[in-house]
Image (cartoon, rainbow, N blue to C red):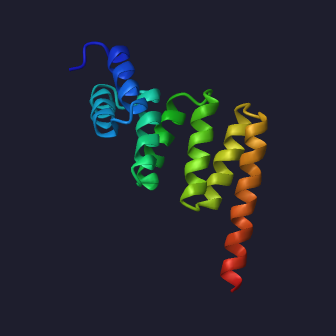
Amino acid sequence: MLDNVDAALESAISSHEAGDLLIAGEKYLEILKADPSHPDANHNFGLLCSKLGEPAMGVQFLRTAIETNPTVAGYWISIIDTLIEVKDVENAKIALEKAKEVGHNDEVFEKLAANIELLRSSKTESEAV
């Protein structure tokens, strides 16, 4: 059992920032084993999954972070970016709408909306070809 989750999270983030991704991943998973709904560990592990080439797997961790704490704009930005990365237009639009419903209306969300629209347009064009 993890004695100090905050210290473990700090250590995981330090490893992540230093580029020690496997060690960071192990540390995030240790935190999630002790507290499966820990929002920061879920968020950061979801980002790590994307960085390691598994963005679709990262989405589930990003969702958990949002479900646990929907007030953090960064969680919403990360999941919308990741959904755009995996070309999931519909879920990206849904996430953007939900983010706005809980009060996230910063300029970055307008840029995400434009990115979703670009992706939607490019998908429509490629389907027509």
Q: Tell me: 1 left or right of 21.
A: left
Q: How many marks?
A: 0
Compare residues 53 and 105 and report the one nearer the observer: 53
Q: From the top left corner, tell me how far across and down residue 124 is, in percent.
A: 71, 74
Residue ranking furthest to the front: 18
| Residue at figure coordinates x 43%, y 30% from the top left | 17
Quadrant of the rendered structure where residue 73 is? top right
Q: Tell me: 88 left or right of 46.
A: right
Please determine whether, in this image, residue 60 is positioned above or below residue 12. below
Compare residues 127 and 67 and report the one nearer the observer: 127
Please determine whether, in this image, residue 108 is positioned above or below residue 59. above
Q: From the top left corner, tell me how far across and down residue 44 is, in percent.
A: 45, 34
Q: From the top left corner, tell me how far across and down residue 122 is, in percent.
A: 70, 70
Please determine whether, in this image, residue 73 is positioned above or below residue 128. above
For the N terminus, the image quarter is: top left
Compare residues 107 and 31 and report the one nearer the observer: 107
| Residue at figure coordinates x 75%, y 59% from the top left | 117
Residue ranking furthest to the bottom: 129
| Residue at figure coordinates x 34%, y 39% from the top left | 21
Q: Tell me: 71 left or right of 117.
A: left
Q: From the top left corner, tell me how far across and down residue 74 is, in percent.
A: 60, 33
For the C terminus, the image quarter is: bottom right
Q: Tell me: 21 left or right of 61.
A: left
Please determine whether, in this image, residue 100 is positioned above or below residue 81. above
Compare residues 35 and 110 and report the one nearer the observer: 110
